[in-house]
Amino acid sequence: MNEVNASQKIVLTKDTLFQPLEEDAVLLNLEREQYFGLDEVGTRMLQVMLESPNLGAAYEALLAEYEVTPGRLEADMARFLDELLENGLVRVLPDGDVAG
């Protein structure tokens, strides 16, 4: 996961709104005036990543929830996190910072 490690936590940036819908969700970056749609799995992955104390805990929770190999989940989480970071939707908190 690039420069991100399992002990770190992610939070939405101050310019991002996250709106879960029925099964999907929408992310809106107010600064860039862009919106992004998430499917059911992407929505759940983001919810778990935001609610977990760190990315390692999110990984473990998702591994228990979905029928997926560890390697596949790690790759999917890394790719998803890269997209979120590149689009300015989330930021990584320093190790030990849980408040953001």
Image (spheres, helix red, strand yellow):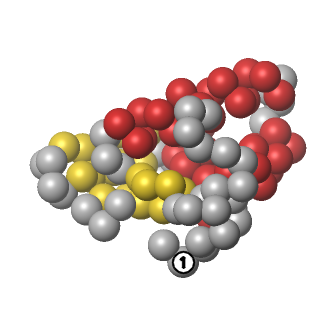
SS category of the residue bearing label 1? loop
- The type of residue carrying mark 1 is Ala
For residue 58, say whether it is visible. Answer: no
- Say which residue label 1 marks: 99
**Residue 75 placement (x, y as % from top left):** 66, 24
Q: Residue at x 35, y 50 (%)?
A: 89
Q: Residue at x 59, y 43 (%)?
A: 4
**Residue 22 placement (x, y as % from top left):** 47, 52
Q: Does residue 83 appear to the left or right of 77 in the view shown?
A: left
Res. 83 image quadrant: top left
Q: Residue at x 62, y 27 (%)?
A: 76
**Residue 28 placement (x, y as % from top left):** 26, 52
Instruction: Give above or below for 17 relative to 62.
Output: below
For residue 27, say whether it is visible. Answer: yes
Instruction: State the residue in front, 7 or 72.
Output: 7
Looking at the rendering, in which quadrant would you find the N terminus?
Answer: top right
Instruction: Give above or below for 62 relative to 29.
Output: above
Q: Does residue 46 appear to the left or right of 6 in the view shown?
A: left
- Label 1 environment density (alpha carbons within 10 Å; few <14, some 14–19, many ≥20): few
Instruction: Give above or below for 90 relative to 51.
Output: above
**Residue 99 placement (x, y as % from top left):** 54, 77
